Image (cartoon, coloured by chain):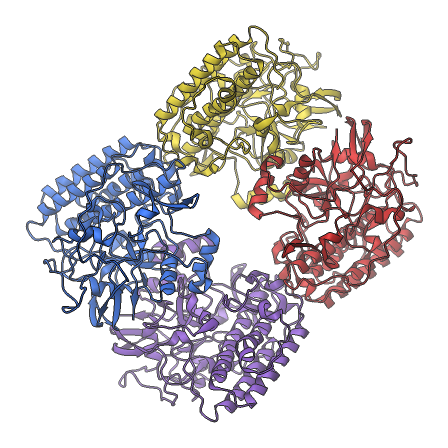
Chain colours: A purple, B red, C yellow, D blue
């Protein structure tokens, strides 16, 4: 992190802190105490645990160090809600989180209030720059858990044989289609490559794994203008990575996660309940593993982009799309979000607004649809440190660095990623068999 | 089941139905909605599931068949809360029960009320004998789940790193010790053996696996007057069954379940929280597997009794001891329950009160302490059908019969078994590696 | 063991020792050094290991103790070829036996010769009765491993994708059919039950688990005149024990082990290669687990016999049938072995020849076909110690006793059991999911 | 592959074919038929399988397509000895290879002769360039299996509790030490980085995964002059990748593979038997996983090099060092091989001899010791396709490409890699938990 602290930063951060903390609660509003106990799969955690852990983060890395005289809400929480920071404290095995019936939701909410008040007091008291940096890190950390709360609830409600529905209200009204709607054959946008700088630039917030900014040479490449809407090829071993084919066999995969078929009718389970596949066919395919994404690309005669090809194409573009703020909570056709591409925060590291750049001034298309939002886009890049990578000092060095093996990078955010959270240099990462996230495919070619 | 229906039976059953249903709720009174979601181990179920499943049993096997015009509370519950009756309906995998956040506790309680009212209406309406038999079966079924609720909550609270306490109020006052207190060296009571009849007799309720009554020849044997209070021998492979030694190695067993040691001080986790071992040393050892019970017996130079040796010794004796009704909720020293051996329901199948029989009129002791209650007693008998065994007809035939492989019989009930539920012919059964029950040791010799 | 040592015993034992040791080698004659390395499944061991381990048994329990000045062939073999005797020496994990490429076959054969010479010298030198008892135990132990060599080679050759054939020569000529051939509907032989004595009697050899002789009360019962020839019922969960149905699902069982189907034609893999099922349909079904045997019995409306019902029916009968000595090496129809029921060793414990007893002097059948040989017969009895059971003293106490949990008893021997090895009181035992043995079904009813 | 076929190529290839095929046999000369059956771990295959599979490769990809009228040695071998080419034929599960007792060694050797004669006949007959390319691929494939034969025999002999010795003769004489011996503190050689070309260049043989040659930008970096000789840091979770720490816990790693300690004395098991650690302390540490290599580097304050940093440093250097041709069969101290750095094939892609380049003309050291040989060097690079990577067409496309997930790249060859096989652009790859290979550590820094 390389945050400087201009005079007004504290106030802005205070506002951001409050709104992020509030949104976490809002996301849990329709959940019962029992819903918040479910841990449906090894990747997931109970919602109540997310509520507690995000507060633990502020208590452990901000208040303990920077708030004079801060009194721990409950000393046991220091290890109970530690996720994986070995150098900070012991922690329970992840699978035990579903046994934390005590503390109950009410006590966890009191914990949140206790922490909120202390952080706000700290912010009011002209804290040192490092404290502000930590709070900013905590806010970003909490946004990651907002996404996880929704990911995990979708899984929890899918595992429940009654398949409850998380959100019953109408989504925002469908916008009218633009005439530039990306239909017909998939078109590709070409990029010239050459020497690029990759990684976060500027002094706004980023995670340690987005640094250092470094030079990279890219050969010419092309990216598909939108995400992949179909799926297929589950029966041909020659398309698959060896580990991927083993996964297909072991798990019996024949469709993306959350697809099910009853008497020949396919449906997709979403945060708005089961949706007939027939009505979702222009929406991007989601909940795919890297293995499926890679095999699909091969089947289609293409490949996945590298993370730095993606980043070079995304840098400087407006951050817009079907993100959490759209309220849709599921991937939608590219056309539906056309008008949402209104001005907003830009993805550039420079901090200034950058207009949409026509890559091909003479051409019939000039747009990368669904660059942000809808589905995280699997890349062909393993999650490793950039040249010269240095983790944060102390326990926070365990945040990202220790996961740099066996995982692939995803880019772009999804329909449940907060818009303020995502950017062009943002690196998400999962093991190649992970399907419980909103993860999809953008094709590339050389 | 061989229940006849004398005129007043319906009223008595009605009363029993109401009190058993009420006790189930009482046992859950101190649990939060979150507590009722925890499924801490493969053997266990969430308390909320127990609340629903016991109602499901009445709905499925009583109301559907005998209550004219009965309307299912929720058709999905027919399969959702089915435990394992393959011929009745499909059922979810057991491990998924912790995902049933919906229906919530309140809806489950409404389900209970709906079922209660219908059963009571049925009982008021002069139902056929078979309906009464089914209700009686359901009542006994519910008592089994009362025991499971407590067993599972103990496990759930043990797995929770905070180790919450289920019952904080004082237990009933300790009674004064009798002068016949069983202290000093363990004494044995001898039995002559010979031809016995085993299995349930008479027309009171029993499970199908307690029948038919049949003749068995017993060689002379002796039983220890009380349960075993110590433990040991975990380091000597020669004492163990081969599978048992493998279990010791695989699980790293070096003490009974729920024992833990901190800085050299051992404690036992109970429904009343952690208790120092030093204060529990005269209480029977509990939460042992069959493997441990068998190895202990060999170490001590004895053996475990067969189930029919135990039954021959127990038949006709008063049912008294540290059962659920004592409110202690944990095993206690034999002396503590001495005066509790007051008249109560007898264990005989004849139904009449039988006085305590002095086995040895001249001797200094004549009593089998802890015959009922404290801990289920592992026997040396595999759980198999008696000669001529026939399961109940229909789906209820799956109640007991299909588990007749790989399990060992336990006898006598425990500190969380309802007194009205246990009897001399009662057969409990678990796989030999099971430790999550209140299971202990009575020694025998030939 | 309760062997006395009459004067001529040593000579007879010497002869028996020589012939048993020789047969073991004969069974391996057609195996290559590579064949003798294969360990195809967790139950199996390589043939070379069997060759070494049976010699280890004589060295460890006879020569070490009774042969003055005996020099170990190789001190490392003392632990290398120990199977499971914890109190004797350490031993390698069973699964490692396929890594014992050294010592090679030739060295193992030298080990055998070394041991043979020493045992024969001991026998020539008027050894104490206890030494003779141990040698007799070793001979019986080796006969068990002869059966295992064939069982394991069948499995090894089945796992080899090329499916090699163990025995290519013709079997002995088919005998002509007797007019009493058991065809048509399956008939049952009734037994009156009553008080019986069970377990080995007399002073001939038996294993510790066949003792003590004890009284048992049997209700009247009936046994099928022959073994079951068909199979079925794999699709109905209501027929199965709960653990059995889980095994069916987990392993995808839909036919006995070694059955396979190619383009609709079923065949059975045997020690004589694949045999079309169409030519085997009157032979008993083999290679079934207890779960399958139990489910089949239920499907057919019968049950499995208890081990003591079987023994009461078998005691005193001639030991005859399709045993290893017939050379067939696979189960055959009952009619084919009719004339083989010639005089031979009897099954009685008394040692005298006992004529075939007509159970029903007036009836049209009086014979229990396939009582010995063809397939081990699963019984409804768990493998437990008889009342008053005491294992052999010392390390040999680990021979049988420590396996008394989780296993079911089988009786009668199979087509690969040496005739001299089997008797009415003989108890074999396997876990209920075991299919790799020649194990089949005799039905019973009450 | 991009091999052209100059006139004399066929003769040279013929000679290379013969010598490589011969060396494979020579490596197996001291193995018994039983040794060649052992499959000690999931990564390993029996030596006999390697003998057969390498012949299968020539039969399947050369003779079938290019040798007119070629008759398969045995049609079953086409699938029996297929390793993993899904599009070529079915294949048995890898773990079954230890069941292939038939065909025996002699038949496999006849298979080899059959194939050898046919390939040589083909080579004599002026074959098309593509056939020559395939033969060259087959020769390189066989060299990989030569390395695997030794790797797997080391594992097989380690698992055998008797720990047999593969090579008992003396190694080649120790050379005298040069005065430039790399002792004392570890020194680093600096590289300037900049724009490099990576991947194979020229028209000599390479695997598909070494192509295409492409540009890469490297920041300045430094490499340690020799491999790491010590080990440590197994107790500190903060040093480890998260998956690595889990592996340490799961497997109980506290030392490299093949290290064992008896009464405080450590020894290392090698192809020449157990060697006291005290005599090996200047030899590079071997048989480490990537997790251990990565954690060690962190502990030492350094990092692992990327594969392209390594390649940029290695390109153009002489291929010399402790490779299979040295006959040592185990890693040795850097000083011991000093004089072996005599002229030999160079590592460059250009094919011409390249003199050792002084990186630092003024400096006190100018040499990268152990660049080739001793141990494969784990790099910080995930095994992925180079930009524009295209697998070979047809089934051979499964050779390398389908393993591009979850693996890390290793560079440089080891003490059992044929000298003719290795080069600067050569990419080996294993999952990060692999320890059964000769794999070690070269440190790097930025």
Q: Quadrant of the image for the C terminus of chain D?
A: bottom left
Front residue of A411/C180: it is A411
Q: Measured from the top left, where is residue C82 in percent x and y? A: 48, 31
Could you tell me how many numbered marks the image carries? 0
Front residue of B30/B235: it is B235
- Give above or below for D307 relative to C239: below
- Give above or below for C373 relative to A241: above
- Give above or below for A120 relative to A38: below
Q: Measured from the top left, where is residue A259 in percent x and y? A: 50, 63
Res A168 seen here = yes
Instruction: Please tell me in which quadrant of the rendered image residue B149 appears.
Output: bottom right
Q: Measured from the top left, where is residue A422 in percent x and y? A: 44, 79
The answer to whether residue D70 is left or right of residue B77 is left
> Which residue is most to the top?
C7
Q: Measured from the top left, where is residue B198 in percent x and y? A: 80, 33
Res A329 seen here = no
> Which residue is most to the bottom?
A7
The answer to whether residue B405 is left or right of residue C176 is right
The answer to whether residue A344 is left or right of residue A41 is left
Q: Quadrant of the image for the N terminus of chain D?
A: bottom left
Front residue of B382/C212: it is C212
């Amino acid at each position: 992190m390389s945050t400087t602290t201009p005079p007004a930063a504290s106030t802005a951060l205070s506002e951001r802190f409050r709104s992020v903390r509030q949104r976490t609660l809002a996301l849990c509003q329709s959940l019962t105490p029992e819903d918040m106990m479910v841990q449906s799969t090894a990747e997931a955690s109970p919602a109540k645990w997310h509520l507690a852990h995000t507060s633990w983060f502020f208590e452990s890395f901000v208040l303990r160090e920077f708030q004079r005289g801060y009194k721990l809400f409950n000393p046991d929480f220091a290890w109970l809600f530690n996720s994986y920071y070995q150098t900070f404290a012991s922690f329970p095995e992840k699978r035990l989180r579903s046994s934390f019936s005590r503390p109950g939701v009410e006590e966890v909410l009191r914990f949140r209030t206790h922490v909120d008040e202390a952080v706000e007091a700290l912010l009011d008291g002209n804290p040192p720059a490092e404290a502000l940096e930590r709070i900013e890190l905590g806010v970003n950390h909490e946004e990651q858990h907002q996404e996880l709360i929704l990911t995990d609830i979708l899984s929890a409600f899918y595992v429940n044989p009654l398949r409850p529905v998380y959100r019953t209200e109408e989504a925002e009204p469908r916008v009218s289609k633009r005439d530039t709607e990306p239909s017909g054959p998939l078109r590709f946008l070409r990029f010239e490559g050459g020497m690029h700088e990759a990684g976060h630039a500027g002094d706004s917030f980023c995670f340690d794994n987005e640094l250092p900014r470094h030079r990279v040479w890219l050969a010419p490449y092309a990216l598909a203008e939108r995400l992949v809407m179909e799926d297929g090829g589950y029966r041909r071993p020659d398309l698959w990575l060896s580990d991927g084919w083993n996964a297909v066999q072991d798990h019996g995969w024949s469709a993306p996660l959350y697809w099910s078929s009853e008497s020949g009718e396919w449906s997709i389970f979403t945060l708005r309940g089961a949706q007939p596949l027939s009505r979702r066919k222009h929406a991007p395919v989601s909940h795919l593993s890297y293995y499926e994404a890679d095999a699909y690309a091969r089947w289609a005669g293409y490949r996945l982009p590298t993370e730095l090809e993606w980043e070079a194409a995304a840098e400087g573009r407006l951050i817009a799309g079907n993100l959490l703020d759209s309220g849709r909570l599921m991937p939608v056709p590219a056309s539906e979000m056309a008008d949402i591409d209104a001005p907003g925060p830009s993805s550039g590291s420079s901090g200034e607004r950058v207009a949409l750049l026509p890559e091909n001034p003479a051409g019939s298309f000039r747009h990368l649809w669904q660059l942000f939002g809808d589905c995280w886009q699997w890349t062909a890049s393993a999650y490793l440190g950039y040249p010269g990578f240095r983790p944060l000092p102390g326990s926070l060095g365990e945040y990202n660095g220790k996961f740099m093996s066996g995982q692939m990078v995803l880019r772009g955010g999804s329909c449940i990623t907060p818009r303020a959270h995502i950017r062009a240099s943002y690196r998400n990462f999962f093991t190649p068999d992970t399907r419980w996230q909103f993860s999809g495919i953008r094709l590339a070619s050389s």
